[in-house]
Image (cartoon, helix red, strand yellow):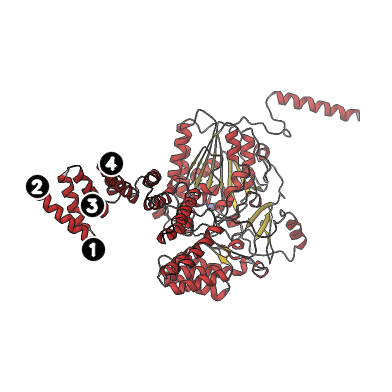
Amino acid sequence: MIVHRAVLAALTIVAAVSGACGRRDPVAPPAFAPPRLIVLITIDTLRADRLGAYGSRAGLTPNLDRFAETAVRFTSAVTQVPLTLPAHATILTGLYPQHHGIRTNDGFTLASVPTLAEALHAHGYATGGFVGGFPLRASSGLSRGFDRYDDDFLKRSTAVERRADDVVAAAAGWIGDHASQPVFAWLHLFDPHSPYTPPEPFATTYAKAPYDGEVAYTDAAIGRLFDRLSGAGLASAAAVFIVADHGESLGEHGERTHGTFLYDATVHVPMLVRVPSVPARVVDAPVEAADLAPTIAELAGTTLRSVDGHSLLPLVAHGGGDPDRPAYAESYYQNVLLGWSPLRAVRTRTWKFIEAPRPELYDLQNDPAERTNRVNDRGTLAAGLQRALPPMDDGRPATTAPAGGDAAERLRGLGYVGGATTPTARSRAVDPKDRVEVWAALEDGIDRIERDPAAARSFFARALELDPSNGLAMKYLGDISFRAGQLDRARDEYRRALAAGFTHPDVFVNLASIAERQGRSGEARDALSQVVKAAPGDADAWNRLGLLEARHNQVEAARAAFTRAIAAAPDRAEPYYNLAIIERRSGNETAAAGHLRQAIERNPSYPEAHYELATGYLAAGDPERALTDYRAALAARPAYAEALFGAARAELDLHRTADARRDYEAFVRIAPPEYARQAAAAREMIKRLQNR
Ligand SMILES: [Zn+2]
């Protein structure tokens, strides 16, 4: 005993001495100096196996591979959801979806939970988020805590994504502007997400594998970011975190893109972490996307209250970790959309269990493609893994409101489907993997709905043949009929979709439009009221309701609806314009002018708003200001007949007869037939001006 104690004492002394020499005691918690710059790069839709650092020989990612040589490389990292918005919500909060509240890309907003950006901001960091794709729009709630949240490109109402180089340029500029304080910058690079359209030279080089081309382009853009940080002297002191939000199936297991299944093609993600003065290493223990927020918070010297993830700093510093840690993944995409069963999985380094009506177990070491379901011969193991799943939240996830109108269009452009089906016991018993053909037919239909509606129709009909109660297929058939002007048919198809339990704001909006065109304004009002009742934040629906009321001279109701539209989306210009027209009609000219100016503030090249404002000035005897706004309207839309006529009138008042004559002549040239009377008056005026 005495000898033993002496050995212990000697060891203690050795440890103390080595500590004094600066070597780290391997059991002490790591101590890092908070970096002045923390960069988080999330690469959308990047399969781990496309990186050289994760075994690819295709040479797509030289910059990431060079970075990986200096970083901690996690070989068993798992995203919690293979969908962009919920995955990022997890990355930026450290919470599982049931705690941050976002289950799919549409219809959910971030719950009032603490975010990483808030914690870092409170801790003195400048916080900037630079996103590349529409699913991460600020209205999702992810912008909370960011001093600067750059989704500005989405102001163009048809924009869905921007190139990695644009994100890099915006972020690098902002980082440079804030170098005097600690900085946290998050870059979201969306390019590998479908549609696969890499720029040149990648489009040509990877003509046969455009997804790979997007990956190679994104890697090149990351190289340019590293160059800029190095050039600014910021690279060596920066902590850099790189992760994919999910992968891409590319047809594996019958899945074209991502979101439905929990196989490794989409849930196993690359994760690389470089912390200054920490040597490169490889960590094989399972880790989660949810670990990133607590890791970054701890590195910065702060903490996040209540997270589902664990700080990775001990693994970053010392390696190791628990090889049997059950990493979690889920998909509620088909559950929300079609009422089918959700899928939930746990993945250790060697096994994956998927909870489903027909559960699955895969031996990842010997069957990495997950082809042989071992659940029957390894029942005990499967049951043990199932017990490691977090408790299931009861019932259906609380959707807020799926996007309607142009937001729905933009999501569809990225291959995402919106809407929700009320699940029944029968629908919940449906295993998504038993409906692969149904989903494939739906995806094929959605893919063709713009360019080949007839082909799309036959795909949706095929989906209905396989799954007769599929409300989503019925809704899309309704959309095709609606766009073709087959209103009765569209109405029937939409009503069948609703009867099947499927709801989507566009169904009600289009039913309202059909009812109004067919002269049933009460029915139209009812349909729009359903949308705003279900989704009080749907500015587009409020705006439409206001227009309907305005057409029927319901001034009070129209005013109320436009006011709600403004409250729901204060950045949008049209509801201000519509409210202005209502006020002008009611004789409130001052209010009208004020709202027109508010519309123009939000959209400086809004031709109708400039035109209406000018008309107000002209009526008030101020031709000078009127002319300025007529010119602004014409700058935005050169062939704006009414604005030309108005400008000529203002010029007459200002005795600028040559200008007036020129504008009357231009008006006569382009005036549509309904302005025959004005055209005659203009000709008369031109004659008179000639005789002067
Ligand atoms: Zn994504």
Residue on which the image places disc 2: 692
State the CA–CA distance, disc 3 to disc 2: 20 Å
Query: Viewed as shown, does residue 532 lie left or right of 342?
Result: left
The answer to whether any part of residue 208 appears in the image is: no
- The disc, 3 or 1, on the residue closer to the chain's N-terminal end is 3
| Residue 27: quadrant of the picture | top right
Three-letter residue code for mark 4: Arg
Residue 686 vs 234, above or below: the answer is: below
The answer to whether any part of residue 621 appears in the image is: yes
Q: Could you say whether the residue bearing mark 3 is in a helix, strand or loop? A: helix
Answer few, some or many: residues within 10 Å of disc 4's Cα (few below 14, many 20 plus, some between 14 and 19).
some
State the CA–CA distance, disc 4 to disc 3: 15 Å
Three-letter residue code for mark 3: Phe
Three-letter residue code for mark 2: Arg
Residue on which the image places disc 4: 625
Task: Compare residues 488 and 334 and report the one nearer the observer.
Answer: 488
Question: Which x, y percent locates residue 169?
Answer: 43, 40
**Residue at 89 percent of width and 28 percent of height:** 3
Residue on which the image places disc 1: 673
- The disc, 2 or 4, on the residue closer to the chain's N-terminal end is 4
Q: Could you say whether the residue bearing mark 2 is in a helix, strand or loop? A: loop
Task: Compare residues 348 and 41 and report the one nearer the observer.
Answer: 41
Residue on which the image places disc 3: 645
Answer few, some or many: residues within 10 Å of disc 2's Cα (few below 14, many 20 plus, some between 14 and 19).
few
